[in-house]
Image (spheres, coloured by chain):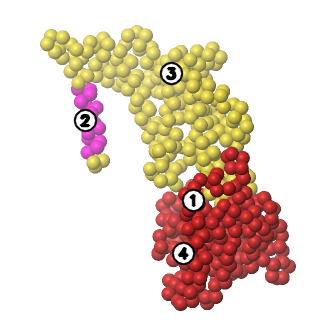
Amino acid sequence: MSRGRLLLYQALVAVAIVALWHVLTTVPVSGRILLPPFFFSNPFDVGKQIVDWFVTGAIWRHLAITLWESILAFVIGSLGGVLFGFWFARQPRVAAVFDPYVKMANALPRVVLAPIFTLWLGLGIWSKVALGVTLVFFIVFFNVYQGVKEVSGAVLANARMLGMNERQLMRHVYWPSALSWMFSSLHTSVGFAVVGAVVGEYLGSAAGLGYLIQQAEGVFDVAGVFAGMFVLSAFVILIDLLVTVAERRLLKWRPEAERHAA
Amino acid sequence: MEAGRSAGTPAIELEDATVAFRLADARMFTAVAQARLSVADGEFVAIVGPTGCGKSTLLNIAAGLLRPVSGAARIFGQPLAGLNRDAGYLFQADSLFPWKTALENVAIGLEVGGRARGEARARAERWLASVGLAAFAGRYPHMLSGGQRKRVGLAQVLIRDPRILLMDEPFGPLDAQTRQIMGNLLLDLWSRDRKAVLFVTHDLEEAIALADRVVIMSAGPGSRIIGDWRVALARPRDIFEIRLEKDFHDLHREIWGVLKDEVMKGYAQSATPVETRA
């Protein structure tokens, strides 16, 4: 399928869904509206709300805050994940001692931590960042750990025969291998950073996309909830596009098929 | 070291080297028993044996990657402790750094040795040219064919100018034509400064065509060196041509007479699990 055709079909899906939504919420079928607008709003109201947000500029502050929280969560979580991933992979004894606790912490649904973080860090951005960090950390941690562990024996032996010392092995072999695993999980970890930020905002905050949605929901403003969802989706797609660009640059040494396998 | 070289001390000397591994059930498995082998400086020695006979084990002893449980390994007269710093090793498996370009892969050996990056890269470019890959400097390993990767590997090892070259079935995964081209390339590069070479292969024809001496190992476990032939064919050789000569065929027939039995034994043994063999 050519690129233009594909885009056309993708746009058609959106048009069909919006059209169906419009018909079901505004046109009576055998004397009854199938989707009551009170619960489902309608495309015009939602569109009007989105345009309003952008025309008045009210949305920018919320977008900026959610973006900032996501970035902080991603950076801090990644740094921690890389450090601990490296440390555990190079020190099997440390890894063995902490193994059950790492599994335990990773199994915990992170949402339950949100109230604690709010208590500890207040209603500002840091409680949201903390929630995002707990999500990002484990993804990066496991990938870096795997990346260091799975360096090919032949490549390692070759590096040693070429005269590399421990520090050079770290720089030329373990580090690039670990980073490649981390980058291949970039979509997931960036996605989780956003999830952490939005969920945190939803559960208690004074700004951000999650706050907008929660506020609208609180006054039964369904159009506001849907509008918030659409802005959030567009926001995530935009970030995902940026990640794809970054990934192409960083993993250009990898065969195409491998990049998406990990 | 230099004094040893002029006095004709062997580049590699294995004295009754025995290698054994502990199996999962705590019994010992002897891979190589009392191997005695000496490679003179400037000599090209090929080791041939049935699959799983421990050919690579010998190579790993000479590289210092494996320590023999008994016996000794000496490099230019010095007992080997730790890695063999005089040796370059071309592995059987893909061992290029996948995240480095061909040029970076070749230059890395000099860079970690403390050479300036610019100088290392300039020399790497010359080495890539001498293995016929000048136009592929910016490619990553996955963009190269199997034969091209082996060429990069060869340049990666030779750029450090090791006094000893260890090669573990380096052309094993390549197709027949590419192997012959690589063989000629290797002989061409080797003839310039005649390093000591220890070349492991399962292909007797390849061994005779390349080497000054062909060493035959018995089937494992506890494999030994059971034969040692001098190859009196003139150099420079062309691998395509040399296979047609009568001397080549005579030597091949003679060695194959011995090797054949071991190959058959090797096959019979590979049908039974390791535990029951020891």
Q: What numbered label is drawn on residue A181? A: none
Instruction: Confirm whether the magenta stretch covers residue A7.
Output: yes
Inter-mark Cα distance, 4 to 1: 30 Å
- The region drawn magenta spans A5-19
Does residue A205 sit above or below B240 in this rendering? Answer: above
User: Disc 4 or 1, which lies upstream in sequence?
Assistant: 4
Q: Nearer the viewer, mark 3 or mark 4?
A: 4
Which residue is the site of mark 4? B182
Q: Among the chains, which one is red?
A: B
Q: Chain of mark 2?
A: A
Amino acid type at mark 3? Val
Amino acid type at mark 1? Ser
Q: Quadrant of residue A17?
A: top left
Q: Chain of mark 4?
A: B
- Specify whether disc 3 shares its chain with disc 2: yes
Which residue is the site of mark 2? A12
Instruction: Confirm whether the magenta stretch covers residue B195.
Output: no
Q: Residues within 10 Å of mark 3 (few under 14, many from 20)?
A: some
Asked whether the residues under the numbered discs 3 and 2 touch, taking CB atoms below 8 Å apart as contact, a structural biologist would say no
Q: Nearer the viewer, mark 4 or mark 1?
A: 1
Amino acid type at mark 2? Leu
The residue positioned 56% from the left and 42% from the top of the image is A182
Which residue is the site of mark 1? B270
Q: Quadrant of residue A234?
A: top left
- What color is chain A drawn in? yellow
Which structural element holds mark 3? helix
